[in-house]
Amino acid sequence: MNPVPLKESRALRWMVAILGLVLVLSLTQELARPETTDLISAGTAASTLRRAVPILLAGLGGIWAERAGVVNIGLEGMMILGTWFGAWGALEFGPWWGIAIGIAGGAAGGLLHAVATVGFGVDHIISGVAINILAPGITRFLSREIFAKQSGGGITQSPRVESVGHFDVPFVSGGEIFGWATPDIFGWIDDRGWFVVSDLFAVASGITSNVSWATLLAIALVPGTVYVLWRTPFGLRVRSCGEHPVAADSLGVNVYRMKYAAVVISGGMAGFGGAFIAIEQTGIYREAQTQGRGFIGLATVIFGNWQPLGAFLGSILFGFADALQLRDRTAVHALLLLTGVAVGLIALRSLKRSQPVGAGVLLLISALMLWWYLVTDSVMSELPPVTPHIATLIVLVFATSRLRMPAADGMRYRKGQE
Amino acid sequence: MPPATAVELTGITKRFPGVIANDDVHIRVAEGEIHAVVGENGAGKSTLMKILYGMLVPDEGQMTVGGEVVSFSSPGEAIDRGIGMVHQHFMLADNLTVMENVILGAEPLRRGAIDLDAARASLEKLGASYGLDIHPDDMVETLEVGERQRVEIIKVLYRGARILILDEPTAVLVPQEVEELFRNLRELKAQGHTIIFIDHKLTEVLAIADTITVLRAGRTVTTVDAGDVTAQELAELMIGGDLPSPSTTTHQIDDHVTLSLAGVTVTGDDQREALSDVDLAIHRGEILGVAGVEGNGQGELIEAILGLRQLAGGSLTFNGEDISEWPVRRRRESGIGYVPEDRHRRGLLLDAPLWENAMLGHQTVEPFAKGSLIDRAGARNATEAIVSRFDIRTPGIDTTARSLSGGNQQKLVIGREIAANPLLLIAAHPTRGIDVGAQAAVWEELRRVRTKGLSVLLISADLHELIGLADRLVVMLGGKVVAELDPADTTPRLLGSHMTGADVENGEPAQ
């Protein structure tokens, strides 16, 4: 097998997929006009990216733990620790220190999980749930002791914190180089209003303008995780602990140490996600501001088949649903149209793979969605805020085939067992 | 001058709570020889090898490697001394590539990352120099058993092992793969490696070993040269008495057909046909042996007969009635008994007491039930009867199934099924992983019930067992019955070549 053509064809497939997606979004946008203009725009793209980052970080955290064979349902709790410690660090020492201290807070939660599951052999789910219950208690206590005594703070929130700063990418989005403002090429094409092309550049413009440095760091963690897990001895050893710890042990790998390290890294990632929410997204610590993103992150692990890139795509999807409901509630109504079209396309694929029953069910769902879209002008007000969670459910239903979880995921390991 | 000593174990003793696994064991292995360690299950072979490989620490005794006294507290230390182990249950991660499995724990580095090119090159070099055919980038889950074993051997060679321990390496192989393995071992020996080979198949041991050490009940019985001993003598040394064998006595088979399959087709878990158009008939009082490499439809055959798997085509007739649409319970109650291949997963509730285990599958009928309720007293009496009739060694019927030895667990499962007086008994690998004594008891019982008119469908990987017990043999390959043989003029070799689909035109496989 020659690896070069494979890579080329993969790159080609990606480009086709992205173009197809933009095309579908553009078409749906045209159909839904003038009800909403937010299905595909620079603003939605930027917001999607911002909303996706914490989910992505939780997802990467989930991958680190599960690749080492530890189910980390405590990601949510570790994220909550990240929000509090992130805000506190940012207030005391500045935003970058806030990120670092948020990571440390999450890593401490990870260490607790590792001590329980790896050290004492506690069931992974029980330990994770305990951490999810413990974390809000700890942060409430700390808030009462610290934030409540500061001006602008209280027992449920901190004073406002500063963000780490943003940048525009030079030449494509008008970023500055040594004080010289480069042209904003993407923005210019976006403004031309060319069908599909402008939409494509609107998305590009959205994700290259006013980008947080922390977002850049988070996205760099995707290839970073791939590199460490698949190209370094440490990563291979971590993965071997998730697949066959007895074999790893028989080759002199210290299984406990690998698992500890992976779960602490996992917690650190979730903590970064929490700190990102507090410092970058909202600029304030508020109780319960993670809103279950740790769990959605866990869903992206499964959606992404325990691969970092897959989790990244999953987080973009959930980020999109989240961004849409935040920016423009009427856009959620247009989402019905989009879902109808998407399910219809999946139905056609099933039909092509000669799965008539599945295709029939999907076509029916698609028709129902379109009918719902046509006979209504808006959706009930309860629906928009839970759109990301509904998207999670729908996607997991369709993504569960062909998934391959680490073979020893969630199992207790004792040295010397067979 | 005699060859130098590679490994010497002196006075090794290892105790576990309640058992002495090794009791004052002495073994001397010369450099460059193939040294076999034989003994029954539970004779202490595996414990001894785990001590040598650093997985267990002996309570007493001394080990020398290359003349130096050593004591290992982890496999890593044994590896450093040039000792490698090929485990009986392969230590391979399915979802990693061959290369990742081999280099794990000893990865070649370039600038902090794994040097994949160097790793691939060294694997290919090792493979070429020992005649071991492997592909570094394949996922392990796609490999056949023989290939996995080669990966295991490469794994220890990659770590620079000069002394290789192989724990029952032939247990999972068909005869042709065994020959391939033996070729590889001879090649390793020719290049100066020392091989310690654990087995209990004596013909194989005699074919490959230079020296043989016999263990019995945790003690060394003797060490002999392979040239000076016969299989019969070895067996008697191993069990300390006469050898039981699965030899059949001739007897008359009825014309009455107990179970017949007509054109049975079944879809497997991967949506492909696992059984295609299978025709089979089992007569009253007949043991029908099914041979085949694992995964060629035997599992699906059992599930189809029991009703655990829907038929995609064809029909099942049991005792004159079409049972194709019957649910499992009705089939079981009408007289189909089942001894599953994995007694832990399908045969027993390990943490339940024996008397509860004894009613599994029969919990709706007397003596285990009265109306719709469990008859506790009846169940306990019936269990006592099974325990005494099948000689199950247990302190009582309230102990858990887990605390019985493998052989006694198996006797419980077989006893439970036979005590229910079935018309047909499906026995999947009934003697797998149990010792020679229990094996003889199981064979005796199957032969006894057969003469009383019970039909037995015997699925086994032990070809001697199949040839010795069965009245008629069929071979399955790729979900089809590819051959029907008379055990009276069948050899394991011939059976093996049918199982792998090798050329059998002249009644002998192609070389």
Image (cartoon, rainbow, N blue to C red):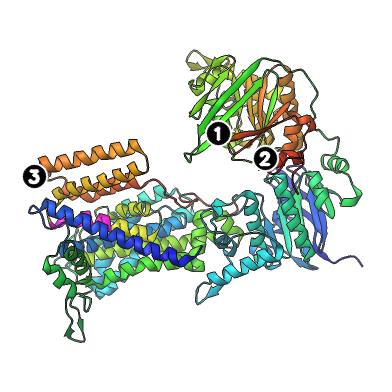
Nearer to us in this view, B392 or B189: B189
**Magenta stretch holds residue A325:** yes
Q: Quadrant of the N terminus of chain B?
A: bottom right
Frontmost of labels 3 and 2 is 2
Nearer to us in this view, A15 or A148: A15
User: For the residue labelled by badge 3, is the local secondary structure a helix, a strand or a loop?
Assistant: loop
Find disc 1 in the rendering and name its residue: B275
Distance (Cα) linking label 3 and label 2: 67 Å
Question: Which region is colored magenta?
Answer: A316-327
Find disc 2 in the rendering and name its residue: B499
Q: Amino acid at mark 2?
A: Met
Q: Is residue B438 visible?
A: no
Residue in the image at 23% along x and 64% along y: A50
Whether tag 3 and tag 1 are in contact, CB under 8 A, the answer is: no
- In percent of width and height, residue B355 lies at 59, 25
Whether tag 3 and tag 2 are in contact, CB under 8 A, the answer is: no
Tag 3 subunit:
A
Residue in the image at 76% along x and 41% along y: B493
Q: Amino acid at mark 1?
A: Leu
Q: First in sequence: mark 1 or mark 2?
A: 1
User: For the residue labelled by badge 2, is the local secondary structure a helix, a strand or a loop?
Assistant: helix
Distance (Cα) linking label 3 and label 1: 55 Å
**Magenta stretch holds residue B458:** no
Q: Amino acid at mark 3?
A: Asp
Tag 1 subunit:
B
User: For the residue labelled by badge 1, is the local secondary structure a helix, a strand or a loop?
Assistant: strand
Distance (Cα) linking label 1 and label 2: 15 Å
Find disc 3 in the rendering and name its residue: A377
- In percent of width and height, residue B11 lies at 81, 55
Q: Quadrant of residue B109?
A: bottom right
Classified by dominant secondary structure, the portion drawn in magenta counts as helix
